[in-house]
Image: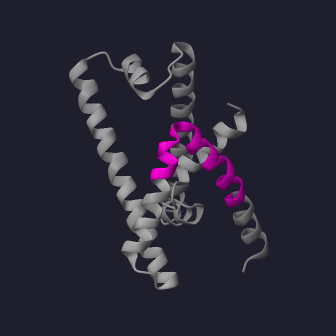
Amino acid sequence: MSILKVVFVIIGTLIGAGFASGQEIYIFFFSYGLKGLLGIIISGILIGITIYKTFKITQKNKNKNYKEFLDCIIKNEKIKEITNIIVNIFILASFYIMIAGFGAYLQQEFNLNSIIGSSILAILCLIIFKTNVKGFVKVNEILIPILIIIITFIRYFKF
C-alpha cells in the first residue's frame, strides 16, 4: 500500500463521518484557552505515537489482521476478549451514530425522511464492507483528497 493511501485512511479514520472536523476540534480545545492549545499538542503527539507504534508492531510481526495484532500486544486471553468486546462496542456505536447523523443531516437539508437517509448510508456501508479493506481504502483514497480540496477552497475563499 502506498504511503498516500495510508495517510488518506488515517485522515479518514480520524475525521470520520464529520465527528471531529477541524472547526469542531478548534472550538472545543480553544474554549479552554492556552490549556486547550496544550491539549491539541498532547492529543496530536499521542495520536502520532499510537499510529507509529501500531505500524511498527504490525510491520515487525507481519500482522495481517486485527486478531494477529491483538495477539501481539495482549497475552492474557481474558483481557484480550474483554478488549475485543469493548472495541467492537465502540465501533458499533460509532457506526450507528454515523448512520443516524447522516439521516438527520439529509432530513435537515433536503427534508428527506431520516429513516430513508439512514438506510441509504447503511446500504452504501454494506457495499463497502463487503469489499473488505480494499473497498475501505479505495473510498478514503477518493473522498479524502476531495475533502481536503473542498476544505482548502472554503478556507481561502470564505463563503
Up-down: is 69 above or below 24? above
Q: Nearer the viewer, residue 80 or 68?
A: 68
Q: Position of residue 128 (x, y in %)?
A: 52, 49
Most frequent secondary structure within the magenta stretch: helix
Point 26% across, 37% down: residue? 85
From this viewpoint, which residue is outermost toward the left? 78
99 within the magenta span:
no
Which quadrant holds the C terminus?
A: bottom right
Which quadrant holds the N terminus?
A: top right
Q: Position of residue 4 (x, y in %)?
A: 72, 39
Left or right: 32 as drawn, with respect to 8: left
Number of numbered tags placed on the structure image? 0
Up-down: is 113 above or below 152? below
Q: Position of residue 34 (x, y in %)?
A: 54, 57
130 within the magenta span:
yes
Point 76% across, 68% down: residue? 153
Left or right: 108 as drawn, with respect to 151: left
Point 50% across, 22% down: residue? 64
